[in-house]
Amino acid sequence: MITVPEALAHLFALAKPLEAESVPLAQANGRVLAAPVAARRDQPPFSSSAMDGYAVKNAEVTEGATFQVIGESAAGHGFEGTVETGQAVRIFTGAPVPEGADRIVIQEDVTPDGDVITLGEDLDQAKYVRAKGSDFKDGQTIDAPRLLRPTDIALMAAINIAEVPVTRRPRVAIMSTGDELVMPGDNPGSDQIIASNSFGLQAMLRDMGCEARLLPIARDTEASLRAAFSHCDDVDLVITIGGASVGDHDLVGKVAGDLGMERSFYKIAMRPGKPLMAGRLASGAMMIGLPGNPVSAMVCGTVFAAPVIRAMLGLGAAAQPALTAPLAHDIAANGIREHYMRARIENGELTVFDRQDSALLTVLSDANALAIRPVKDPARKAGDILHYIPI
Ligand SMILES: Nc1nc2c(c(=O)[nH]1)N[C@H]1C(S)=C(S)[C@@H](COP(=O)(O)OP(=O)(O)OC[C@H]3O[C@@H](n4cnc5c(N)ncnc54)[C@H](O)[C@@H]3O)O[C@H]1N2
Ligand code: MOO
């Protein structure tokens, strides 16, 4: 059995960053920027007003001063002339500050009377002028790679990028295996259960920006598994679920091997997740064979598949980020496998659930953290600091 970091290193060696494609800005949210994009203009492109009021010369602003209003500057309709001594231009938020003016007196500080304004007392001292290029300058770049968020989309729109270079979505096929499985909505026989973790993994991978499709459930025969693998030629990653252990019906590794899969590793010192396997299929696709137990599959999806997808998206080869928190209670020593324990983080404290059987999806669903126990971690006391992965 290899360690979790060793397994991750093998997986990263298999996970190739995918090529870039161009998408319209409106479809770029949640995608990974694949190349830097540069601003095509200054923002603001002119010195602009931050308030509604009057543009004047700053040096002339004193309590009770009067100005002649000579025109108006509105957003989208600037004032062409120049503000001279004793003059003001009526101005609105976002409008170009006219030549000669360097201060906006807000309208709350002004009494207008026809074309003349008089400044009041206790004047707001801010100048309310946004300098040209004060947000960004022509040529300034947004660096890649980065996972684009709504705030980035707004910035890219502002810098006038209509088409965005992003990493292509990883194509993933998810294969459930087992005679006992039926699809949600079907009528299971008395010795059957509903396929579940395939749906959980599909949701996880779609959230990460993958095109993730479910293959028909493969039965526990070599012919059925071969048929399922034959539908995977166009994908970057095949994730199998179940049939990975040592039972007579655990045929996934054998069939994949017969089909030319170059195995990278099998079995890791991790709980849950011991029978994890990975390799490269003859099609060139990467394969990850997850254990069938629902919690094992979802935990391995979090600890291994998610970092693999990030590597494919060009976001680098890094383990799932872990945080630290103090334990809310004592816990027993860990064994010889790194244990990812279902836990809850609440008010900054980590409560590790008593029931850790890898079949219990209700416990996983109640969890919002995987508390990480290193190999042979001694018993821990309340208040001791543990690493955890938020889920
Ligand atoms: N003698 C041993 N037995 C087992 C060992 C071992 O080392 N020696 N390892 C155990 C561990 S740990 C795990 S994890 C499981 C993994 O087994 P498989 O990957 O072969 O998974 P299956 O046997 O096919 O299924 C296990 C369990 O999960 C259910 N399952 C499978 N796929 C799905 C699915 N898509 N949705 C919902 N549930 C699924 C399946 O019905 C079984 O109940 O092996 C232990 N045994
Ligand atoms: O490794 Mo298994 O996934 O503990 O149940």
Image (cartoon, rainbow, N blue to C red):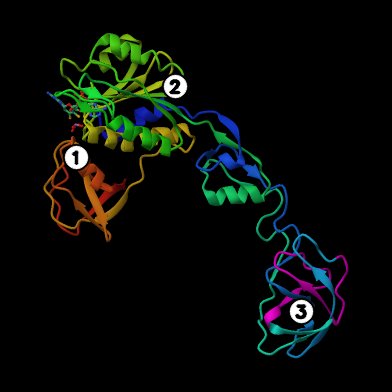
Q: Mark 3 and mark 1 in contact (Cβ < 8 Å)?
A: no
Viewer-closest of 22 and 366: 366
Displayed quadrant of residue 278 = top left
Residue at image coords 39%, 32%: 308
Q: Amino acid at mark 1?
A: Val
Determine whether 199 is above or below 240 in the image.
below
Q: Which residue was labeled with disc 3?
A: 58
Q: Vertical placement of 369 versus 257: above or below?
A: below
Q: Amino acid at mark 2?
A: Val
Nearest the viewer among 338 and 227 is 227
What residue appears at the point 66 percent right and 55 percent down from the top-left corner?
136
Examine the rendering and report whether any part of residue 1 can be seen. Answer: no
Give the secondary structure at mark 2: loop
Question: Residue 304 at what x, y percent from top left?
Answer: 33, 34
Identify the magenta region: 80-108
Q: Magenta segment, principal secondary structure?
A: loop
Using the rendered view, name the quadrant where residue 28 is placed: top right
User: Crowding near pointer 3: few (<14 within 10 Å), some, many (20+)?
Assistant: some
Relative to residue 30, is residue 181 drawn left or right?
left
Quadrant in the picture for the C terminus:
top left
Q: Is residue 105 magenta?
A: yes
Q: Is mark 1 within 8 Å of ligand 2?
A: no
Check disc 3 and report its element: helix, strand or loop.
helix
Mark 1 crowd level (few <14, some 14–19, many ≥20, 10 Å Cα): some
- Residue 120 is drawn in which quadrant? bottom right
Q: Which residue is mark 2?
A: 235
x and y percent of residue 239 in the render?
34, 25
The residue pinned by badge 1 equals 375
What is the x, y in percent for residue 242? 24, 24
Ligand 2, what quadrant? Answer: top left
